[in-house]
Every structure is written in structure tokens, then in C-alpha cells.
Amino acid sequence: MRITWIALLCLSLVGCGSEGGKTGAAAEAQPEQTFSWKLVTTWPKNFPGLGLAPEHFAENVARMSNGRLKIKVFGAGQLVPAFEVFDAVSQGTAEMGHGAAYYWQGKIPASAFFTAVPFGLNAQEMNAWLHYGGGLELWRELYEPFNLVPYAGGNTGVQMAGWFNREINSMADIKGLKMRIPGLGGEVFTRAGGMSVQRSGGEIYTSMQTGEIDAAEWVGPYNDLAFGFHQIAKYYYYPGWQEPGPTLELIINKQALESLPDDLQAIVESAARAANQNMLDEYTARNNAALIELVETHGVQVKKLPDDVLAELQRISTMVVDEMAAENPLAKRITDSMRVFAKQSKAYHGISEEAYYKARGQE
Amino acid sequence: MRITWIALLCLSLVGCGSEGGKTGAAAEAQPEQTFSWKLVTTWPKNFPGLGLAPEHFAENVARMSNGRLKIKVFGAGQLVPAFEVFDAVSQGTAEMGHGAAYYWQGKIPASAFFTAVPFGLNAQEMNAWLHYGGGLELWRELYEPFNLVPYAGGNTGVQMAGWFNREINSMADIKGLKMRIPGLGGEVFTRAGGMSVQRSGGEIYTSMQTGEIDAAEWVGPYNDLAFGFHQIAKYYYYPGWQEPGPTLELIINKQALESLPDDLQAIVESAARAANQNMLDEYTARNNAALIELVETHGVQVKKLPDDVLAELQRISTMVVDEMAAENPLAKRITDSMRVFAKQSKAYHGISEEAYYKARGQE
């Protein structure tokens, strides 16, 4: 490898001789270009799972590019506040961002589809729709006017329905409940008689503790334990109807991406795919141990939402998605594409993944 | 980008000047080293899903490395027969291979664990165990004496139980059945009164057509349709108890891997992660349409294995894994690690993925 390293050293420090053995001036052939990027996130710095994904992504890119693309990761509030990540990357204040598309729902309603649709695709299906079902192309079309190129940047798997201080035995118990529940799930929750409020992860604990909100969904055991929600709520409900397979996003400023040579673009793309898979692997591996700790050490009561509540939430979800589809032609195309895909994967997963869970459970 | 390209051109054609502006002789700094590798597979060339994974992997590596690592992919029989892939890569005839670990069960019994365990981990769980549960480290330990470094190289998701020419209504119907079913599933099938035989994918159709075998499991609708199994069998059974989340493998000759500089090693690793996720995405997106074609165009009858048959197969599976664990300390460590992981993910998936499938299905 000695020769390679000498060649690289030469490359990074000085100019090279030109073809045919003639010696070119340093001005003729500059050192190979390196790039230093900023990546802003909506997560607390180094937060388990969500916040580690962009860190691993940056390390992977640095290693694959042999240091030619260096990415510095900023936690929420370090460079820009959590909810300004989209604008910062759009305007080029930072070259990249990591967060969740539904945080930008106020600006782009259809962005919510690319995080999660209540009673929609789970993680396996969402990844398949994005990468083999036309989903990613639609997402890029949606972000194009904002000068952004999105990539799937992680998935937590089915989340929990959330933390509550009162039992949910019927739809009546949702009435008047003020809950941190973003995205389309939040809209459904509001239609169901509750009230959805938006909070970044780091704000939830205090809002719940001061009684400003009555309930909150965040992610699942692995992340919820890290925030200590068991200290401020009694019941932990499942299943996460509101986010069955939420996708995180990596967004890149379009000009920044296009300024990279093709090999670095390929490296970024591949590192995003790896980050996307790593996160689901991490949650799948860590959630159960965290759940055991919540139950056995902290006495949390785990409860299932009643079937009739789930059925009613599903009915409202269909209505909400119908209305969003009617808003504009692109929203309609996204909805149609997702629904066809959902119908098909539901049919096949009925005799594969779902049937297998059932068969295995007989033991 | 002009400057970068000039620098690269310079690098690939001639030597460079040394630090401080002095002109070095060409002998002092060689062109950056490039690598040309062969990748042999157990699949027919370009076979949907399984065979395309190594092709995409090679394209991705070429693009990320800017042509410094070129990998030529060979289908089964083009350079070596399907079942000689392991030895070929072990001996360095080819630098890489793509196949399934359980094909090497005759040589290394515990290899079967790294494809699939009957009633064991599904795709999501298998990926989590490999990458966040210690699985990959155990796999590397198992292949170390053979001079091979394994990576997860794809996953098909839950397979189908297979193609049969007789109905399976009880365990008695399995008696005497000669079936293409490899790996641990094959061992279980034999204990259950059937007879497992080994065939590569390309051999199944003829074996079944000539009556040499009575039944066969291959993958699922997307791949089975491509081989035309509906022309030679009547019933298509689910769920794939024998392979709930089969992992494909990318194996690399250890010296070949170590001969790469660190950035190319990272590129190979990341491309493997991408290939691994791409395959599951592809199957998830394609299986249902293929199933519809099998049923609606070709009149295939889709049937569920009876619950008592599944329960008995599960009982035998536990026994088979117990016996394998007793064979040697490494097999025991692999089994223990997988079982702890399986128990935990079964518990958490019971209130997440599985509970969600159920909730969604109420509609």
C-alpha cells in the first residue's frame, strides 16, 4: 500500500506532473478538492438512535471518501433550532439536515406522507415503496421547489401509541386531551376530539411535567426511556397506529450535492442507505431491553388501545388522507401511489410476515 | 470540477511531483492502485432479486471508488458451479462470492444459522441480530478458518412454504415426500417423515418435472414465477416456517479484502449494507404482483399449512437446533445468542409489528 499512500499524499499536498512526463506548474493541477459540510439536525446531539444516525453517516462518508468529504454534525439548537433545519438547508446555511419530513407539514402539507401515514406502511413496506415503488421520486419532486434533495435516513419501526396519565377505554377518554402528536396522526387525533400540539423531542418532558400537555408520543421504549417519560406518565399504550414505520430524512442542499464529483455523490447515497438500515436494526435490537427496564424497574403499565378505538382512529385516518389528496395534484399522486402499494403489501404480508408472526406465536 | 478531474487524470496516468515543488521521477510515485476482482455466485446470471444483488453491488462499488475497484460478476456455472462458490473464494480463485450460507452446511453445520432458522428470526430481526446483536461477529469467527469474511448480502423476507402436488392436511401427508428444502428446514422436514434433497435454483424445475422430487421450496412469488414452478405444481403453501427471514451472503477472500486500502474496504462494507437492504425492498415491492399473476393468470391454489402441522414442525425445529448447539462450543454460542435475541424481539414485536398488522387488518 506504500505506493498508494505516497500517491495520495502527493495528491493532497502539491500539484502533479502532466501526461508525457513533462512537469506542470502547481497552478495547472491543484490538490484534489475536499469538501467541508455542516449537517444540522432536529435531535439533541448524540441522542440514541435518531441523533447517532447522522454521526455514523458522517463517519462513514469520511472513511469512504478518504477525508475528501468532511461533515460536521450539529445537534438541535447548536447552529439552528430544531424546527429551522429545513429552511437552513434550503438556503444553504448548512449543506445537510437530518430530521423528520412531517415537521415541515405547516409549510408543505404532503411532507407528512414521507414520515408516516396512520394505519399505513410499516418500516419494511415504507422502504420498499421509497426505493422500488416510486416513493423517493415523488418525495424529490415535492422538495424540488425548496432546493432540497431528500433521502431516507432511518426508520424506527412501529412506534408506541404514547404516554398517558389517564386510561383510554373509549373514544370519550380522548376528548379534550392535549397531546404531543405531530404529523397526520396529530390531525387524526384532533378530529377524534383531542388536541394535537407540536413539540421537539427535547421539549416534551417539561411540557408534560408542567401539565401543559396531558399525553405524548415520542418513539418507543429505547428512546422514551432515555428521555425519562416514565417519571411523568403512568400508562404506556400500543400499538403505534399513528406511526407504523416512520422514516427519518436526510436532506441535502441541491447546489451542494451537485458540486460533488460523481464518486462522492455515490458515497453520500450509499451512506444514506446504510444509515437508513442501521437505525431500524438498532431500534429492533434495543427496544425490548428498554421495555423490560421500563416495566420491571420503573413499574410502567403497558396497555393496548381498545379495538373499537383503533377502528375509529382508522376510519378518521382514511378521511384525513382523502382530504389531503384533494388539496393538489401532487398530493393526489403521492396518495394514490402509496395506497396502491399499501393494498398490495397488506395482501402479501397477510400470508407472509403477518402469518409467520402468528405461526411462531403458537409455541 | 475541472481541477479535480485533472488531478485524477494525472494520478491515474503518471507520477506526481513531490512535496515542496520538486519534480519526482515516475518511479517514486506510481499511479494509484486499481483492483480487478471476480465475484462468483450460486444464482443464474442476472436472476431477479438474488442474481441482481451482486450486479448492483458491483456497479455501486465501481461508482463509489471511481473505477479503482472493478468487480466482474459470474453466474452459477460460468466460472465455477453453484455449490463450489465457497471453496473458490476460500482458495482465492475468485475474490468474492454471493450465495447462501446454508449451502455449506455439509462442511460447516453451523453455517445454516446464518441463512435461516425454522421458526426463528424474520428479516427485520435477522438484520438487527447481525448488526446490533453480535451475529456478524459470530459469523466471522465461524468463517475465519476458511479464510473468508462474510457480510449480509440481501434478504428475501418470509418465504413461501413451497410447491406441492398433494394437499397437506396433516403430518401424514408429509410422510415419504421428497422435497427440495435445504438448510435446517430440510433437516426438520426429514425428521418429520419427509426426505430433504439439495438442488440449486436452476435444477429445481427439471427435478420436479421428471418426478425426481415431489415438492420444492425456492423463495416466494417474485422468484418462483420467474422459474415457472406453477407449470409443474398445483398447490402453493404458506407461511415459510423454514425460512422466515433468510439472509444471503457476500463472502470475501480475507487476503483480497486486506489488500484494499481502508477507503475501499469501507466502500465494500457500505455497498454490502446497501445491497442487503435493496434486496428486501425489491422482494417486498415485487412479491404481491407476482402472487396475483400466479393466482389470476395461472390458477395456482394458495393454501395455508394447518396449525397442527406448523406446531409439530416447530417442536421438531427446537429439537434440531438443540442438537446442533451440542455439537461444538461455537455452535452453542451462536445458538444461545440467537435464541436470547429471538425471545426478546418476539416479545417486543408482539406489541409492535405483530400488534400493528392485527390493528390494521380490522378495516
Image (cartoon, coloured by chain):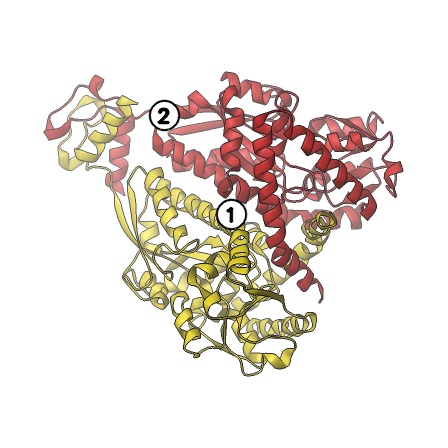
Chain colours: A yellow, B red
Q: Amino acid at mark 1?
A: Asp
Residue B44 is at least partly visible in this image: no
Residue sitting nearer the eye, B273 or B16: B273
Left or right side of B160 for A109: left
Vertical placement of residue B194 versus B222, above or below: above
- Report which residue position mark 2 lands on: B34
Is the residue A11 above or below the residue A41 in the image? above
Q: Secondary structure at mark 1?
A: helix
A314 or A258, which is in the foreground?
A: A314
- Which residue is at a point 52% across and 48% down the rendered structure image? A285
Tell me if B6 is positioned left or right of A42 in this view.
Answer: left
Point out residue A111 in the picture as x, y percentages from the top left corner. Answer: 48, 66
* Residue occupying image coordinates x 26% and y 27%: A5
Question: Which residue is identified by label 1?
Answer: A281
Type of the residue with mark 2 = Thr
Which residue is at the far bottom?
A: A176
Q: Position of residue B300 (x, y in %)?
A: 81, 45
Expressed as whole percent of the image width and height from the top left, the position of residue B342 reads 61, 44
Dividing the picture into quadrants, the one containing residue A45 is bottom left
Labels 1 and 2 share a subunit: no
Subunit ID for the residue under disc 2? B
